[in-house]
Image (cartoon, rainbow, N blue to C red):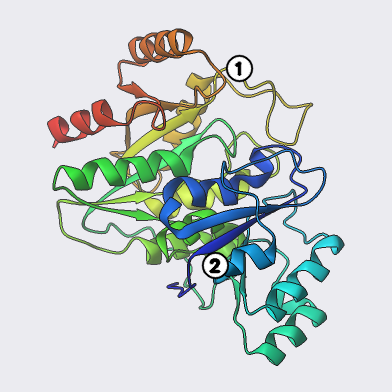
Amino acid sequence: MDIDIKHPYLLFLGEAHDMLAAKTAIGVAHWRPEWCVGQLRLPGCNATCSLPDLTLEQAKEKGAKTVIIGVANRGGKFSAAWIELMVKALGLGFDLASGLHNKLTDITEVVAAAKQRKRSLFDVRHPTREFEVGDGKKRTGKRLLAVGTDCSIGKMYSTLALEREMRKRGMKADFRATGQTGIFIAGSGVSIDAVVSDFVSGAVEWLSPANDPDHWDLIEGQGSLFHPSYAGVTMGLIHGAQPDALVICHEPGRPHMRGLKHYPLPDVEQCMEANLKAATLTNPKAHYVGVCLNTSAMKEDEARKALEETGKKFGLPCVDPVRWGVGPLVDHLQKAG
């Protein structure tokens, strides 16, 4: 699904209670800073993209063309408090783009305002085409899939960092977005969690078609096989990706599964085994090529020690994609051919 959302962007963070609740806005600001003029936060917001706080009027003066609803709340619902602001934004000449489960095009006031001002509404989470059921047939080209011990743990950042590093080295590589934030960044993709369950694996097969033998599709992972809320999406994604290579993503010290205080994170080794077993259904040669740790909550010396110890434990390159890049992991891929 290709989209044509006009930038620069004003990133709307709403009343996000923590940084993860604003992960869409933060991800866009991190990977496409040149597209962003500022952020708009409501009272009580505890998140930031480290961009200037702007009103709608100030953002318009700075040339912003689209307001991105950059909140990723549980269940993907619009807050009633946002509707007045969105109608005002349309009245000022902005387009609106959202990645939530609820649609902009289902809000009567928003649709009426957009029609009156001839503005565009983008619901990027909702596919605009139908997909076939997955068939599990082998496709040419190479595929890498990021999997994780939890959701919101670094799978998108890992695959985007891999794309950047591999392209720097002249390798054929494309990031394949499977979530709303990735779609905003890449300009195309399929939000897998909005696809009817029977067609998830088929949608991923469509997203990552046959390609040159030396071309890598870097497929953004979603959810976790160990998360009671999202394991179903993860399983369909694994089967459709038919990954040749797997990267496991983990955040040391995270106290529990995202949104579920009564569920602890699984052991990394246990998670690796489960994902590999699932992957071998459609690619018996699937194997791990690295570990990506999110060490954002750790001091530098503590983080470096964690990377070293984890790498030794699994005999794989272990990196923090944001802090120090993915160079060792790409070295490993190149040596393995």
Percent position of residue 34, x then y: 41, 55
Judged from the image, the secondary structure of the residue bearing numbered disc 1 is: loop
| Residue 201 shows in the view | no
Single out the residue that lies furthest toward the right. Answer: 80
In this rendering, position of residue 207 left or right of residue 298: left
Which quarter of the figure has residue 258?
top right
Percent position of residue 241, x then y: 39, 52
Percent position of residue 16, x then y: 74, 45
In this rendering, position of residue 193 left or right of residue 202: right
176 in relation to 170, above or below:
below
Pick the quarter of the image with the C terminus: top left
Seen from the viewer's position, the closer of residues 40 and 305 is 40
In this rendering, position of residue 327 left or right of residue 121: left
Mark 1 is on which residue type?
Answer: Gly
Compute the Cα span from label 2 to label 1.
Answer: 39 Å
| Residue 164 shows in the view | yes
User: What mark, if any, has residue 64 been given in the picture?
Assistant: 2
Kindly identify the residue that appears in the image at 25 percent across and 30 percent down.
Answer: 327
Residue under numbered circle 1: 253
Which quarter of the figure has residue 244?
top left
Mark 2 is on which residue type?
Answer: Ala
Seen from the viewer's position, the closer of residues 52 and 291 is 52
Kindly identify the residue that appears in the image at 57 percent across and 54 percent down.
Answer: 38
80 in relation to 87, above or below:
above
Judged from the image, the secondary structure of the residue bearing numbered disc 2 is: loop
In this rendering, position of residue 166 left or right of residue 74: left
Pick the quarter of the image with the N terminus: bottom left
320 in relation to 169, above or below:
above
Which quarter of the figure has residue 334?
top left
